[in-house]
Image: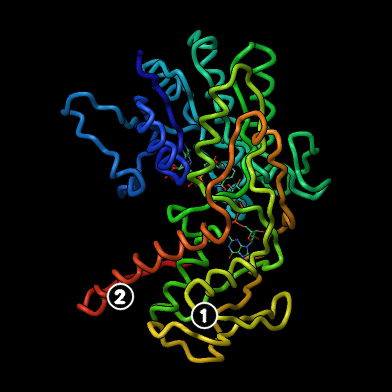
Amino acid sequence: MKKKVALITGVTGQDGAYLSELLLEKGYEVHGVKRRTSLFNTDRIDHLYQDLHENDVRFKLHYGDLTDSTNIIRIIQEVQPDEIYNLGAMSHVKVSFDTPEYTANVDGLGTLRILEAVRILGLTEKTRIYQASTSELYGLVQEVPQSEKTPFYPRSPYAVAKIYGYWITVNYREAYNMYACNGILFNHESPLRGETFVTRKITRGAARIALGLQDKIYLGNLDAKRDWGHAKDYVEAMWLILQQDTPEDYVIATGITTTVRDFVRMTFEELGIELAFEGEGATETAKVLRCTNPEYQLPVGKEVIAVDPAYFRPTEVELLIGDPTKSKTKLNWEPKYDLPALVKDMIEADVALFKRDAYLMEGGHKIFNYHE
Ligand code: NDP
Ligand code: GDR
């Protein structure tokens, strides 16, 4: 059978890395779009790299950017993909308030550029397109749990840009009969999660505090509730969405919601550290109540969490909880990781990572750690 060819935008991101692994395991030839950066930014996919001089290279990177139509057209023309996964985005909700126009360009118009390129190149019958839509579209709560039928009410420039991406995908499907689908994915995390998203900020901060490398973690809204899953499970759903007889949109979620505060609690408990929360809003803190892990020397009463209002968002999404009924029944998709398993995976990876830092520091190396 002819090997399938996939093109992934956002290949250097969390999902791009897991999806590349999955597709390579399935025998695909995988092409990724990466941006030119002044330092290497391929840490997450370096283990997949193949020297282009080898035979049968199945993983190839192309320089590109979703803001550049001619570049997108050229790459798609060259690659002639059977499947495109449009994962590239300015994906940080808080940062989108600082860069709203850029976010609209990449996350909104970027989606249009992919769809238009496929149309211009006459590939509408060959190429299937996955659009990385998001639970952020639901924004201000209209109903819970949120399903494919729940109305949208975006609450950030990111979500407004993504809503354009959502609808232009639906429109091209209907107007040009394209196989183009939205995966409305709820938050998904992993050891590869970007360091400034809240889960990773917590797991890496907790690991560093336990190892004596950091004093405390400053966070924003601890009351926000998210439906968190593992990115490994969610990329499987992306692939399934493109393997169906008809193109449709799907919610991908666990159906369970948890506060940021409880994510903090679970992370520290995984390290054998029990926390006591006190105060509320901008004055809330968490201190060590008990530390049962002899490896970590944390005194009782040490403050490890404080709220910094700088992390509050001008408009917040307070509650997300997805209804995955459609994906469970139609795609037969079932996540393998629950939240405790996700927390364990993330904290174990961060402890291992920062033990290496601690070791290097003992040897006299300077390690700088930018944390936001
Ligand atoms: P990441 O932020 O980890 O990765 C984003 C990727 O997009 C990176 O490879 C980044 O490149 C690339 N990118 C950014 N700007 C551009 C641009 N102008 N042109 C081309 N590529 C660009 O995100 P995730 O992997 O977590 O998410 C993947 C997609 O899914 C995103 O579209 C996100 O909005 C969406 N999503 C994510 C969810 C989640 O919980 N993770 C949930 C729902 C949707 P670089 O490495 O150079 O920065
Ligand atoms: P989100 O993820 O905005 O849901 O977008 P993030 O982890 O950034 O925030 C989740 C919730 O935690 C609260 N929060 C903090 N967030 C960050 N980043 N830093 C903090 O210090 C902090 N303290 C509290 C936030 O206010 C928020 O309520 C992610 C991204 O991956 C999007 O691209 C994706 O579309 C959605 O998930 C689904």
Would you say the beta carbon of the disc 2 residue lies within 8 angstroms of ligand 2? no
Quadrant of ligand 2: it is bottom right
Give the amino acid at mark 2. Ala
Q: Name the spot of residue 99 as percent of width and height, x first.
A: 58, 48
Quadrant of the image containing the N terminus: top left
Closer mark to the observer between disc 1 and disc 2: 1
Would you say the beta carbon of the disc 1 residue lies within 8 angstroms of ligand 2? no
Residue occupying image coordinates x 52% and y 24%: 114
Image-quadrant location for residue 57:
top left
Indicate the secondary structure of the residue bearing disc 2: helix
* Residue denoted by label 1: 273
* Residue denoted by label 2: 358
Q: Name the spot of residue 183 as percent of width and height, x first.
A: 61, 34
Q: Is residue 315 visible?
A: no
Give the amino acid at mark 1. Ile
Name the foreground residue: 150 vs 281. 150
